[in-house]
């Protein structure tokens, strides 16, 4: 399901809604929804359209996440990485950031879109405390 995960990550990075992608490549919202859920993987021609529209490569959309959990190389730790390190769901991390209960980052809302910032330094400190429990 790495295509779906990669597509979600790229849309989030570009602060783009699925409907914008659908309109940009001439597909229905339901098709994009199915790509994002992992129910369907688009044909190669459609993958190329998606990559061109998003300004990435098809390889970026298809690559298996190596789960590089080294947070020393990050300025902002992605939600998926924090979730893996803490053995929690991505939703759990997002809600904690939105509610202000996560000591390692914060969330801010612009219109109806949330942005997340997770500090590598604060996350490392928290993981140390978390593992001691």
Image (cartoon, helix red, strand yellow):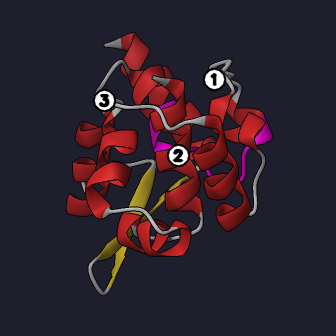
Disc 3 versus disc 2: nearer the observer:
3
Q: How far apart are the two marked residues, 3 and 1, measured between alpha carbons?
A: 19 Å
Residue at numbered disc 2: 7
Quarter of the figure with residue 73: top right
Where is mark 3, residue-wise?
39
**Residue drawn at x 75%, y 63% as measured from the top left:** 55
- Where does residue 27 sit, x and y in percent of width and height? 42, 62
Residue 41 tag number: none
Image coordinates for residue 32, horizontal then vertical, percent: 37, 53
State how far apart marks 1 and 2 are (Cα): 12 Å
**Where are the magenta residues, as a range?**
73-81
Q: Which residue is mark 1?
A: 65
In this rendering, position of residue 52 left or right of residue 39: right
Circle 3/circle 2 CB separation < 8 Å: no
Residue shown at 40%/41% (left/top)? 35
Q: Could you say which is closer to the camera, residue 37 or residue 118?
A: 37
């Amino acid at each position: 399901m790495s295509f779906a995960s990669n597509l979600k990550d790229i849309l989030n990075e570009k602060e783009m809604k699925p409907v914008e992608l659908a309109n940009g490549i001439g597909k229905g919202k339901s098709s994009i929804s199915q790509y994002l859920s992992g129910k369907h993987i688009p044909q190669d021609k459609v993958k190329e359209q998606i990559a061109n529209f998003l300004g990435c490569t098809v390889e970026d959309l298809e690559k298996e996440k190596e789960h590089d959990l080294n947070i020393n190389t990050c300025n902002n730790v992605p939600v998926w990485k924090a979730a893996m390190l803490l053995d929690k769901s991505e939703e759990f991390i997002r809600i904690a950031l939105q509610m202000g209960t996560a000591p390692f980052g914060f969330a801010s809302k612009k219109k109806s879109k949330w942005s997340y910032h997770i500090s590598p330094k604060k996350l490392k400190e928290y993981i140390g405390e978390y593992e001691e429990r």
